[in-house]
Image (cartoon, coloured by chain):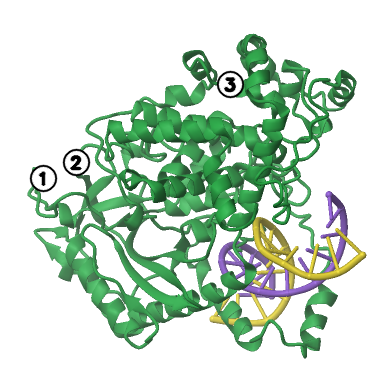
Chain colours: A green, B yellow, C purple
DNA sequence: CCAGGCTAAACAAG
DNA sequence: CTTGTTTAGCCTGG
């Protein structure tokens, strides 16, 4: 679905650059009405002819180790999934555990830890990463995961166990391969090798028993089939995006033309999983932030976790004065007015319905049916703040080891956003007499999106000539797992996909290299990601990736956290029966 | 401001 | 499997 040109890093400073870019797309849509039309000779000419070997030879620059910053988009992923609660001074130290993944293994007895890597992905021996090879020579050369395609149903759920390669670790192949890819990063040898090696030894047998190649192949198969099933159909995407873009454009137009207070809204920032290429199953949820630049403001923390703030207007800002009370920009007033305007506009489009206001939720949610599926669009008012990020973010976004210090700095030079979101009762006051309903929560959705779209430690990660990684697939699977678990147990309803996303971010910071996430190691990587998530749940601590002092899972309570951790562990150990069952229901296995 | 170029991802074909 | 085509979304040069 979405792609973003990586062509050039567009520095965050040019706020204008985002003008009417989408115009083109809309035009295109118009003139190409039917996918099935066969009269499009000219279409073919235009495309087929001129476009073929598009390769981006450009910017293989060297200046940045990893990513170029995408651009400032923004949003918040809010409402429906919100469960954040001020973290009673949690001040999670979490970074500690993040940075030393190995320790977990010592603590957790039965679990295979990364040793499992040996059984790792379908990787052909030749592409195993060096770490693995040096550590344990007995990799199993599973052929590929052969994600049993949908049709392979007969054998009820698991693909043919590719037995043969079971025991006879073909040393020869490995040595061979090893010789070829012998680049072995330094830190890896020095840093981890020691601990890993021991553990590898120790756990070797037990793992060999616990996860036989057969199981492993079956797991690979389930994960890959599940992923395939989570893909969004091209047609669905096309239809959904068309209606969503249309209404979005019209809302923006309305705000600019027919309102005073909102006439300065900027271009919408498309965020959330659809625009991060992480939407699963169906394109039925869209998030669009509608930013208003605010200058000359005072931003003061509300509560102690650093996620919520009150906003005071200094002089100027005439347009927003009307939402002011005692110098405070009242989120509730502003959102209410925004909502009215959106409703006014949407009234003209009969297919769309504005859903009822939910307390504390920053989104104006619109829904409509497209071919019997309900699509929802969250339109979120937000303030765009160009000054430096709140000090609570100082220890957040620890991506230096993963994406590099320069990328971090680039992101931190971008604006941040505030959305009219609060928790608990709106009429609760803080010391300064500000009501909860009038406070704002920070949002870094634009950075989340930028990172996910440019997520490799190498610049070429997942690009045509680079290796592909499984970071996003792992996240899709985790989101899917979480949503299936939630379906079956309503006590999990305070957990949301943002928890999954945050877990991935933390995981990427502890396993920083692209080779830690090789596409061929999907089942291993997913396994480790689940262990990470279970760890957060067990400890009852999942720090906001940007604001470490905010614990995202203080809401659900320890008991529910542990329960969820146990359920996930169970799925992991049993080879994901919940995925299997799901595939079964859909007749895909 | 916008036309045109580029990307990721779905998908079709071999 | 590999290779090519299509298309929504994004970016830039002019």
Residue A307 position (above or below residue A336): above
Left or right: A213 with respect to A383?
Answer: right
Label 2: chain letter:
A
Residue A256, horizontal then vertical, whole percent: 35, 80
Q: Tally the numbered discs.
A: 3
Q: CA distance from mark 1 to mark 3?
A: 48 Å
Left or right: A568 with respect to A474?
Answer: left
Near-viewer residue (A284 or A337): A284
Q: CA distance from mark 1 to mark 2?
A: 8 Å
Q: Quadrant of residue A35?
A: bottom right
Asked if disc 1 and disc 2 are in contact, CB closer than 8 Å, the reply is: yes
In the rendered image, which residue does mark 2 sit on? A303
Residue at point 38% right, 32% down? A537
Local crowd at mark 1 within 10 Å, few (<14), some, or many (≥20)? Answer: few
In the rendered image, which residue does mark 1 sit on? A430
Residue at point 72% right, 31% down? A214
Label 3: chain letter:
A
């Amino acid at each position: 679905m979405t792609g973003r040109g990586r062509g050039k890093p567009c520095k965050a400073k040019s706020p204008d650059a985002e003008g009417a870019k989408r115009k083109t797309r809309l035009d295109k849509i118009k003139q190409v009405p039917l996918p099935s039309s066969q009269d499009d000779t000219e279409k073919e000419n235009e495309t087929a002819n001129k476009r073929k070997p598009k390769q981006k030879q450009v910017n293989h620059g060297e200046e940045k180790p990893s990513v170029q910053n995408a651009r400032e988009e923004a949003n918040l992923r809010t409402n429906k999934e919100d469960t954040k609660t001020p973290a009673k001074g949690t001040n999670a130290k979490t970074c500690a555990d993040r940075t030393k993944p190995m320790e977990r293994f010592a603590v957790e007895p039965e679990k295979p830890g990364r040793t499992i890597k040996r059984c790792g992905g379908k990787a052909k021996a030749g592409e195993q990463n060096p770490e693995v090879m040096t550590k344990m020579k007995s990799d199993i050369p599973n052929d590929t995961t052969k994600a049993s395609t949908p049709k392979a149903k007969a054998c009820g759920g698991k693909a043919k166990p590719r037995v043969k390669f079971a025991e006879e670790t073909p040393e020869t192949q490995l040595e061979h391969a090893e010789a070829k890819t012998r680049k072995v990063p330094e830190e890896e040898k020095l840093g981890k090798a020691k601990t890993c090696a021991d553990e590898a030894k120790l756990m070797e047998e037990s793992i060999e028993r616990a996860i036989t190649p057969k199981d492993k192949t079956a797991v690979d198969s389930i994960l890959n089939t599940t992923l395939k099933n989570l893909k969004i159909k091209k047609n669905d995407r096309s239809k959904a995006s068309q209606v969503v873009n249309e209404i979005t454009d019209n809302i923006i137009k309305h705000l600019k033309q027919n309102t005073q207070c909102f006439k300065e809204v900027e271009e919408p920032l498309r965020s959330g999983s659809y625009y991060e290429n992480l939407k699963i199953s169906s394109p039925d949820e869209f998030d669009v932030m509608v930013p208003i630049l605010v200058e000359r403001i005072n931003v003061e923390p509300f509560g102690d976790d650093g996620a919520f703030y009150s906003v005071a207007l200094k002089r100027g800002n005439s347009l927003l004065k009307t939402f002011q009370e005692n110098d405070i920009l009242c989120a509730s007033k502003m959102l209410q007015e925004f909502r009215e305007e959106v409703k006014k506009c949407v009234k003209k489009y009969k297919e769309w319905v504005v859903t009822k206001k939910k307390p504390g939720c920053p989104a104006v949610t619109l829904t409509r049916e497209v071919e019997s599926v309900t699509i929802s669009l969250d339109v979120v008012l937000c303030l765009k703040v160009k000054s430096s990020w709140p000090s609570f973010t100082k220890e957040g976004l620890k991506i230096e080891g993963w994406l590099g210090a320069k990328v971090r700095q680039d992101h931190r030079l971008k604006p941040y956003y505030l959305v009219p979101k609060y928790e608990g009762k709106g009429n609760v006051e803080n010391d300064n007499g500000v009501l909860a309903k009038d406070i704002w929560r920070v949002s870094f959705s634009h950075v989340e999106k930028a990172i996910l779209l440019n997520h490799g430690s190498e610049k070429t990660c997942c690009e045509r000539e680079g290796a592909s990684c499984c970071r996003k697939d792992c996240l899709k699977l985790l989101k899917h797992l979480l949503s299936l678990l939630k379906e079956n147990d309503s006590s999990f309803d305070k957990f949301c996909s943002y928890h999954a996303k945050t877990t991935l971010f933390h995981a990427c910071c502890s396993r920083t290299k692209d080779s830690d996430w090789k596409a061929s190691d999907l089942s291993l990587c997913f396994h480790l990601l689940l262990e990470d998530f279970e760890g957060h749940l067990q400890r009852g601590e999942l720090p906001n990736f940007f604001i470490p002092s905010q614990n995202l899972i203080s809401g659900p309570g320890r008991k529910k956290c542990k329960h969820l951790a146990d359920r996930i562990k169970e799925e992991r150990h049993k080879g994901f029966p919940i995925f299997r069952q799901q595939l079964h229901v859909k007749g895909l296995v």
